[in-house]
Image: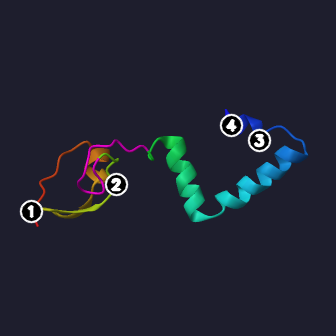
């Protein structure tokens, strides 16, 4: 809904569009807006624990019996992988 407001044209909207364009050319604001728009910024309060507790799993490097692998690679192939303990 907010995006449709930026399609109108008047001096205030033009200034807002320019400001948003500047912000979205920077890495951190762009990542934050993308996370908010996609729901990746959601965190469930599950108490104390690991910093990832209650957050979406990031695409980390894994050590598997077959060699190194990214978390999302088996998900994309829809196949499980055997993890080795560190």
Whichever of callouts 4 and 2 sits on the residue coming sooner in the sequence is 4
Q: Label 4, label 1: how many angstroms apart (C-alpha)?
A: 46 Å
Question: Which residue bears the numbered disc 3?
Answer: 6
- Say if the magenta span includes residue 47: yes
Q: Are marks 4 and 3 in contact (CB under 8 Å)?
A: yes
Q: Nearer the viewer, mark 4 or mark 1?
A: 4
The Cα atoms of the two marked residues, 4 and 3, are separated by: 7 Å
C-alpha span from label 2 to label 1: 19 Å
Which SS class for mark 2?
loop
Residue 29 picture location, percent across and down = 59, 58
Which stretch did the figure color magenta? 42-53
Q: Is residue 55 left or right of residue 85?
A: right
Residue 42 % position (x, y): 42, 43
Task: Give the position of the N terminus as an image quadrant.
Answer: top right
The crowding category of the residue bearing disc 3, from other C-alpha atoms within 10 Å (few below 14, some 14 to 19, many at least 20), is: some
Percent position of residue 56, x then y? 34, 47
x and y percentages locating residue 6 in the rendered image = 76, 41
In terms of secondary structure, what is the magenta stretch mainly? loop
Q: Inspect the magenta stretch and tell me whether residue 11 lies in it.
A: no
* Residue nearest the observer in this picture, 24 or 65: 24
Q: Counting other residues with Cα less than 10 Å from the Cα at mark 1, is it few (<14), some (14-19), or many (20 or more)?
A: few
Task: List the residue tagged with mark 1.
Answer: 85
Which residue is depicted at the point 79% across and 55% down? 18
- The residue carrying mark 2 is 58
Say the numbered circle drawn on residue 2.
Answer: 4
Distance from the alpha carbon under mark 3 to that under mark 1 = 50 Å
Q: Residue at x 78, y 50 (%)?
A: 17
């Amino acid at each position: 809904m907010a995006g449709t407001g930026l399609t109108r044209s008047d001096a205030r909207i033009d200034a807002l569009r320019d400001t948003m364009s500047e912000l979205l050319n920077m890495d951190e604001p762009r990542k934050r807006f993308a996370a908010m728009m996609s729901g990746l910024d959601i965190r469930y309060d599950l108490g104390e624990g690991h910093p990832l507790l209650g957050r979406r799993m990031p695409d980390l490097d894994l050590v598997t019996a077959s060699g190194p692998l990214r978390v999302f690679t088996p998900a994309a192939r829809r196949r499980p992988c055997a993890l080795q303990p560190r």
